[in-house]
Image (cartoon, helix red, strand yellow):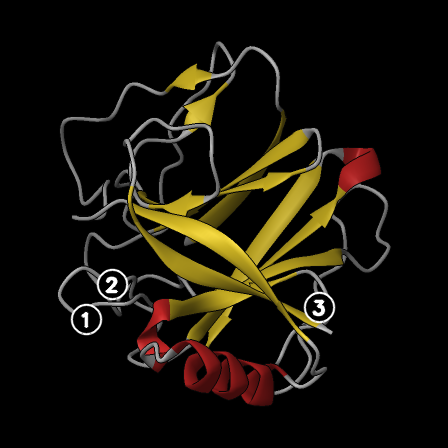
Amino acid sequence: MTTLMTYAGPVDAAALVTRTGGVPLTPAGFSWPRCATCAGAMQFLAQLLLDDLVLAVFMCQNDPGMCDDWDPASGGNRALLFPRGGLAAAPVPDRGATLLSEVCGIAYATVDEADYDKARDQWCATHDRDVLEVLGRFGGAPSWLQGDETPPCPSCARPMAFAAQLEEGHDHRTAMNFGGGGCGYAFTCAPCLAAAFLWQC
């Protein structure tokens, strides 16, 4: 079985739903992540609801290709895990490439096929939808493009749990930048309240 994340149309920029784009919902005292290379404010990519937690994913897009935004530990991206209660829309920095130009709601579709690519093709054929409307995979196992890069938790050093795989988006004009046709991979360690993100193409 594969749980696909599919394009569900526009949603409010501060909705407490799984979505790409918009504004992150964060706890009090939140500081917007900045790139370790260029020091610019990162771009908010996605918010994923995980039971009683919220996963927020950021990546530097101030000078695409110049900062190590693909690596989980080089400071060019950031994934944060928050308890769901008491969150509010974060103040957005007034400088930098901080927000995507579209907010896309995400729906879930379960397909009786373990292989991600086959599940995506099957869903598209069954529902007469374009392949770009599959925005990724929720849970299960990652479909790596270049080989397994599961990161260790920075706190406990155990391999992190796979949370979701993200495609760039349903429209190239508003899509995330994973090198052109790449995929992003989000991981968590719930006991340590830690998360990580990387992408491959």
x and y percentages locating residue 158 in the rendered image: 86, 55
Can residue 167 be seen here?
no
Disc 1, disc 3: CB below 8 Å? no
Question: Which quarter of the rendered picture does the N terminus lie within?
Answer: bottom right
- Residue behind mark 3: 150
User: Residue 98 at x, y = what percent?
Assistant: 23, 40
Q: Label 2 to label 3, Cα distance in Å?
A: 24 Å
Residue contact between numbered discs 2 and 1, judged by CB atoms under 8 Å: yes
Residue 189 makes an appearance in the image: yes
Residue at the spot of label 2: 175
Q: Please name the amino acid that badge 1 sits on.
A: His
Q: Quadrant of residue 33?
A: top left
Question: What SS does tag 3 mark?
Answer: loop
Q: Amino acid at mark 2?
A: Ala
Whichever of callouts 2 and 3 sits on the residue coming sooner in the sequence is 3
Where residue 160 sits, quadrant-wise, is bottom right
Q: CA distance from mark 1 to mark 3?
A: 27 Å
Q: Residue at x 48, y 87 (%)?
A: 121
Distance from the alpha carbon under mark 2 to that under mark 1: 5 Å
Q: Nearer the viewer, residue 56 or 134?
A: 134
Left or right: 128 in relation to 85? left
> Which residue position is annotated with label 1?
172
Q: Position of residue 10 (x, y in %)?
A: 26, 45
Mark sitting earlier along the chain (1/3): 3
* Residue 190 pos. (x, y %): 78, 39
